[in-house]
Amino acid sequence: MDLSPGAHKPTAKEIAAKFREDIANEVYGPNDRLPAARGLAKKLGVQLMTVQSAYGQLRAEGLVITQQGRGTFVRDPAVPLGTESGSSPAFTALASELSTIHEALRQLGDRMDRLERLVGGDEKPPAR
């Protein structure tokens, strides 16, 4: 982004694209802190809401997490989405649902194993 006086003021979409590119090119790695929104807004000559919107886009995509009072950090892709503090509420809800689904599938798998053993004659049915 051009920071010279009189340069084009970037939109939230352009700011998000620049950070997306920087994250992809490992300029910012997992757990790295992005510049403070207020300072970046001043540096770019844009409103604070513009930078906050850009960071919000990155958060919604699961690329960053925001921690109240600490800042915005690149999310570690090794950590499951929605499990870390500061995750997007949508990813947190999705992680919870996936956990419930995973447990239900595990229980169904256990039941299938028991049924297969019963049908195969490896196990006797429980007495009633």
Image: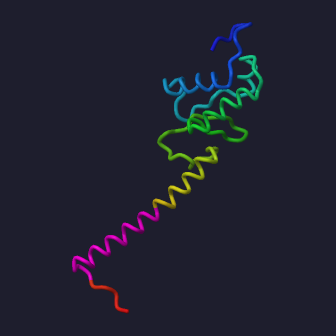
Q: Identify the image quadrant of the N terminus.
A: top right
- Whether residue 107 appears in magenta in the rendering, the answer is yes
> What residue is drawn where x is 69% and y is 8%?
4
> What residue is drawn where x is 66% and y is 35%?
56
Magenta stretch bounds: 103-123
Image quadrant of residue 68? top right
Q: Nearer the viewer, residue 10 or 27?
A: 10
- Whether residue 27 appears in magenta in the rendering, the answer is no
Q: Nearer the viewer, residue 85 or 114?
A: 114
Q: Is residue 81 left or right of residue 116?
A: right
Q: Is residue 15 left or right of residue 116?
A: right
Q: Nearer the viewer, residue 8 or 27?
A: 8
Q: Position of residue 7 (x, y in %)?
A: 70, 9
Q: Position of residue 74 (x, y in %)?
A: 57, 34
Q: Position of residue 86 (x, y in %)?
A: 64, 44
> What residue is drawn where x is 40% and y is 68%?
108
Q: Position of residue 57 (x, y in %)?
A: 63, 33
